[in-house]
Image (cartoon, rainbow, N blue to C red):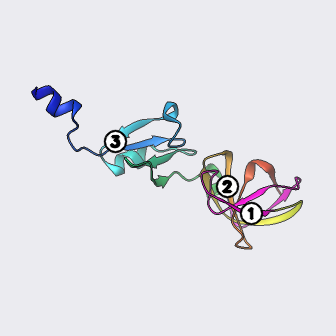
Amino acid sequence: MAYYKKYAAGNGTKYYRVRKSWTDAASQLGAFTSLENAKSACKAGYTVYDDNGKAVYTAAGQQASAGVPFSVQVDILDLNIRTGAGTNYAKTGETTGKGVFTIVEVKAGQGASVGWGRLKSGAGWISLDYATRLA
């Protein structure tokens, strides 16, 4: 009975999980009782989630250190603009269309291997997987 009380019933310990997305348990790098330890283990493309699945920290993408602002070329008509850096954020209902856009911030997030770029216009975020960085 003592085992059950200690382990099976839970001991009130909260864990921070490092994953690519909350629903992708197979991508988990670890579970930590310390937020600082979870942040240290978090690498580009991963996020730290609390027990309720709320994202509490996202590792900066590799491009984050690259100089911003910069311009990108979008060659598809219907690239969705989102309210945040990831497919786990809502679409704004707008698309970019083809053209050149200025990116002022880069973050890693769900659904993009290259990262997400925040548009200078303030319209939202686009997946940099579908944009070509201009020199």
Estimate the spatial distance between the alpha carbons at disc 3 and disc 1, rounded to whole Å: 37 Å
What residue does disc 1 label?
A: 93
Q: Is residue 18 visible?
A: yes
| Residue type pointed to by label 1 | Gly
Please state which of residues 8 and 36 is positioned toward the viewer in this rendering.
8
- The residue tagged 3 is 32
Magenta residues span 66-95
Q: Residue furthest bottom?
A: 121
Side (left or right) of 94 relative to 62: right
| Residue hosting label 2 | 116
| Residue 135 in view in this figure | no
Distance between mark 1 and mark 2 Cα atoms = 17 Å
Viewer-nearest residue: 98 or 22? 22
* Residues tagged 3 and 2 counted as in contact (Cβ below 8 A): no
Whichever of labels 1 and 2 marks the residue nearer the N terminus, that label is 1
Residue 92 percent coordinates (x, y): 70, 64
Identify which amino acid the numbered label 2 is placed on.
Answer: Trp
Mark 1 neighbour class, 10 Å CA radius: few under 14, some 14 to 19, many 20 or more: few
Q: Which residue: 54% across, 41% down?
A: 20
Tell me the quarter of the image containing the N terminus.
top left
Q: Check if residue 11 falls in the magenta segment.
A: no
